[in-house]
Amino acid sequence: MFELVWRGVIIGIGATMLMDLWAIALYRLFGQSKANWAPVGRWFWHLQYGKVFHDSIADATPYKHELALGWISHYAVGILYGIVLALLAGAAWFTAPTFLPAWILGILTVGAGWFLLQPGLGIGWAASKTPNPTKVRALNLAAHTVFALGLWGTALLIR
């Protein structure tokens, strides 16, 4: 069990790093906005007060270290997803990792963003309150596919 959890931590970190590299590439090549984890940090900070959904996270009381908390939360969630995959797929998957289980988990995790984080930040269910929800949704699906590639690729590296 410990071995699976440890492998899950590693693949979660690798997948989150690849997702971050993807975001940097989108910024540099296509001018996509840079990732800003400060609002996510503010959202996580306010969870301790029982506040999950905000009309606008920008209107919530700022937290001095929200950017750092956002980055920590981003990696903690990625690690959690890596552990979930490791436990669900089991030790046999690590001997010959395949993409499909990682991709299924990656796509399922989009739901946490669409139905918890995005409405929590005040941008609506599945980014419905953004200027271009379809673009945001497509970018979310692409990013989580890249995350899945990171889970799978890291599992291949550590087998």
Image (cartoon, rainbow, N blue to C red):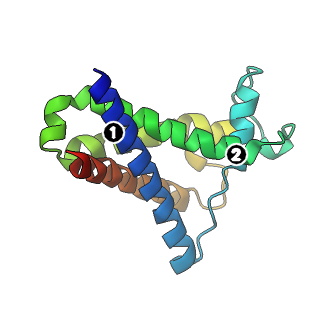
**Side (left or right) of 81 relative to 121:** left
**Side (left or right) of 142 relative to 95:** right
Which corner quadrant of the image does residue 87 belong to? Answer: top left
Q: Which mark is residue 134?
A: none
| Residue 58, position as x, y percentages in the image | 81, 46
Which is nearer the eye, 132 or 156? Answer: 156
| Residue 115, position as x, y percentages in the image | 54, 35
- Residue farthest to the bottom, as pictured: 29
| Residue 57, position as x, y percentages in the image | 77, 42
Give the SS element for disc 2.
helix
Q: CA distance from mark 2 to mark 1?
A: 26 Å
Give the SS element for disc 1.
helix
Would you place residue 124 above or below residue 80 in this image? Answer: below
**Residue at 75% over, 39% down:** 42
Identify which amino acid the numbered label 2 is placed on: Ala
**Residue at 66% over, 55% down:** 130
